Image (spheres, coloured by chain):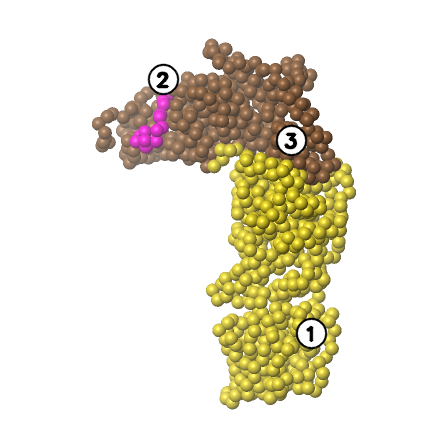
Chain colours: A yellow, B brown
Amino acid sequence: MIAAINSATLLGVEGRRVLVEVHVSNGLPGFTIVGLPDAACREARDRVRAALLSSGLVWPMRRVTVNLAPSGVRKAGSGLDLPVAIGLLVATGEIDPAAVADCGFLGELGLDGSLRSVAGLVPAVAALSTAAVVVPPAGLAEARLVPGQVVRSARSLRELAEVLRGRQPWPDLPLETIRPSTPARADEGRSLDLADVRGQALGRRAIEVAAAGGHHLLMSGPPGSGKTMLAERIVGLLPALRQPAVLETCRVHSAAGLPLPAATLVGRPPWRAPHHTASAVALLGGGSVWMRPGEVSLATNGVLFLDEMPEFSPAALEGLRQPLEEGVVRIARARNCVTLPAAFLLIGAMNPCPCGQGSPRRPCECTPGRIDRYRRRLSAPLLDRFDLHVAMERLTTAELFGTDAAESSAAVAARVAAVREMAAARGVTSNAAIPGHRLDEVAPLDPKARSLLQRRVGRSELSARGLDRVRRVARTLADLSGIEGPVPAEAAATALELRAGRRALLGSNGWAA
Amino acid sequence: MGRVSAEPLPDVAYAAALAALPDMTPHQLSRLLGDAPALQLYERILAGDAGLLEPLSAMGRRRLRNGTSDGLRDAPGEAMRLFGSSSELERRRQGILTRLACWRRELGRRTVEDVWAPIVAGGISVVRRMDPAYPRRLLRADFPPELLYVKGALAHAAVPTVAIVGTRRATHYGMEIAGEMGQALAERDVAVVSGLARGIDAAAHAGFLSGRQRSVGPVAVVGGGVDVVYPEENRRLWTEVGRAGALISEAPPGAPPEGWRFPLRNRIIAALSQVVVVVESSRQGGAMHTVQAADSFGIPVLAVPGSVRSPQSEGTNAIIGEGGAGLAVDVYDVLTALSLVSQAEGTTVTFSPVRPPDAIQSRAGVPTRKAGGGRRPALATDADLIRRQVLASCSADERAVYGALEHTPTTFDVLCARTHHDVGVVALALDHLEEVGLARCVGPSWQRA
């Protein structure tokens, strides 16, 4: 008369175990779900009834109470359909309780009794400690990404019931029923190679340094100067992901209900480029029940590209500060508080002024006030997070045709991979993460580089924090040229030039308040 | 009028009270006051004497006809002659009577002391046209301001004065030239008059203050009240000009910087100066008002030429081309014009307008060299020689990078493309060139120094 089925729901990017208790007793026929279900969860009743009936199974004309334990936590989504149905079958004696005792169930039911996949299978499966987990066939490949879990599936509720009754073996379902993925723009479909980028010596170097050292990069320049073109090529430079980063990325994508890009399965870093109208919740994650991961989490272990950065809402932009600093984003709501991963490489792009045309070569018609307001949308603390800030300019025709053929992505990627290895040998995730107190040990300066930087600090062009950032970038530059010892002056000078875009944002006359 | 203090108020206090009336423009005030004491007009308004508004009636007519305020000195009766006894005239008269009633009410509500006390407390002095302290140069304006509100010392406007004006949307180039010119003039005890607007105006005064050595101070003629800082970003500069020189306005304290005040303000800038220098201006820019005013007062105008691609230099290049302005490539052109004016006025000058042979046009390090002109022969100047020596001590890479630099900003990418050098080599070379004073950065770009 009573059954308990293991299942899980999703909060943020973590699965949470849920015990689905089904109680069938005499009384007026009825069906109640308790334990804080959300609307989709409560609708399980109708889906389960239809699925049972169309599978030729029995819908009990008795009093049914379903409790989702722990009952004080909100449950969301339709993934509990399957455990409710199985629970009913156990409670009405259709299935032996022993057959489901050490098994977890996840999935949505169609009215015809088919099993449909739900978002967040990866974290949900990972959260279950049962000997096996049953998921819908479409989620089989996704669920099998979780190491050390036996994952089973069946095509329909009827087939599943037959298996659980011991009348037939588990069906051998093909793995390629994974949900179709749309090619992400940056790294699939066509090959984007750095060799396509003409000129832009500084921008190319900046992209290479960003990829090698994990330094956040801001590019400012008029439309058509190649900001997006360069940014899109960074994924091709980053080394392939390894475990556990692959699983973490899959977990986040799965939790967001997004198709896992085929490339993620082979370890390409994710690339996210949200439009600038994205809300703060879309960017950072959140929501009332589910706490869906935002773009910063989807970009974890990969690249977050924010084009037209000043056009993002101030709340969204300022919300980036915590993830940039800590690599995680902590979302707190009235009922829930989750920590989502957000260790991404930020590439920002902006125009030099609202009309986008201003440049040293060609002054534009924007008033100083408008330019000022536009630039101030990026707050100083946010700008401070960028180790690299390059100002780019549109090339003239002569420059477009006159420049030498550039290096290919493959050549640069090899250097990037080497630098990442060197960083790992130093015990840091990337050079951008070298802590300040280890700079003297890890990134010592040779005498010429020291005097060069001292001069800048002396002229107060460089703050103490700025100096640390320059030294990390200089370390990456030295690593890229294969120098493991002290950082040479050339790397220091280049590191300074790679943040020269900041100079454009400083006031032009010393009297400005 | 229940006066609190026993001391009688000066006549300018009454003038100030009248100027502070709603809808009282400087033109109207001047027209109504004539040469009479302000107290007299004050009492006539209080008495509701409609006859005193006759001059306003004429003024309005003329403006209606011309679309300008040129006809302010016309006989009051001219309007009657032009428009006869139309009903329009009657309608206008009614309007004026309403205004008179409004002014009477306002004078009753806000006493002369109410207006005067904050002016005194704010350290603002008020000078009327017939006061001995009134700058005599202003009288040559075709419509001298009746009242001047001054914060600071008006004496600063009496020494040799040069106006530096230009666009608010200035380029780096314009800001630099304005700053350098302001500084060079300050070093020679020439007062700089400007409008304290954004861009060129602010750069000129900022440069002036950095070069100031002696008693001469900056003079700023502002559009709103002298206590109304605009734009806000110039607050420090504003305060400093008020302390070191003079802030002048025709608008009563507290008056907002409304658009219509600025062309009027520009005529004061022109009239106060002996030479007007336009650094950057578009064809329709506000600085062109100053140029027109200066032209009509017979004050020489100089303009700084600029790139033909820069919209900010369209106006200046055009007036040079049309012969409306002389050429100002450096401070010596300004000083030459100034000494000619001073000579004509019979005053002595303390500076030398002769360009020394080693003078360089600007910090950009261009030696004085004019193509095809005998006026300034090409000379290998000291600065030029020093630069060559320094360059000779540089490495080949550094010389190549220097060769790729221009006198206008060049981006780093272009330098890499021109030299075919790696990013690091160019960065290191630029750092060295900057250290030895051959290059400097302008925003994210680089140019020769």
Residue A107 belongs to magenta span? no
Find residue A158 and report its horizontal and vertical position in percent.
67, 82
According to the picture, the residue beneath numbered tag 2 turns out to be B132
Residues rendered magenta in the picture: B115-130
Q: Chain of mark 2?
A: B
**Label 3 neighbourhood size at 10 Å, few (<14), some (14-19), many (20+)?**
many
Judging from the image, what secondary structure is the residue with disc 1 in? helix
Please report the residue visible at 67 percent of the width from the left and 81 percent of the height from the top: A160
Q: CA distance from mark 1 to mark 2?
A: 99 Å
Please identify the quarter of the rendering in which residue A375 is found.
Answer: top right
**Label 3: which residue?**
B433
- C-alpha gap between disc 3 and disc 2: 56 Å
Q: From this view, report whether residue B241 is shown above or below residue A473.
A: above
Could you tell me residue A408's position as x and y percent? 76, 48
Mark 3 / mark 2, whichever is N-terminal: 2
The residue labelled by disc 1 is: A137
Where is the C terminus of chain B found, in terms of image quarters?
top right
Q: Amino acid at mark 3?
A: Leu
Q: Residue at x 51, y 33 (%)?
A: A510
Q: In the image, is residue A278 above or below residue B411?
A: below
In depth, the one of A106 and B326 nearer the eye is: A106
Q: Amino acid at mark 1?
A: Pro
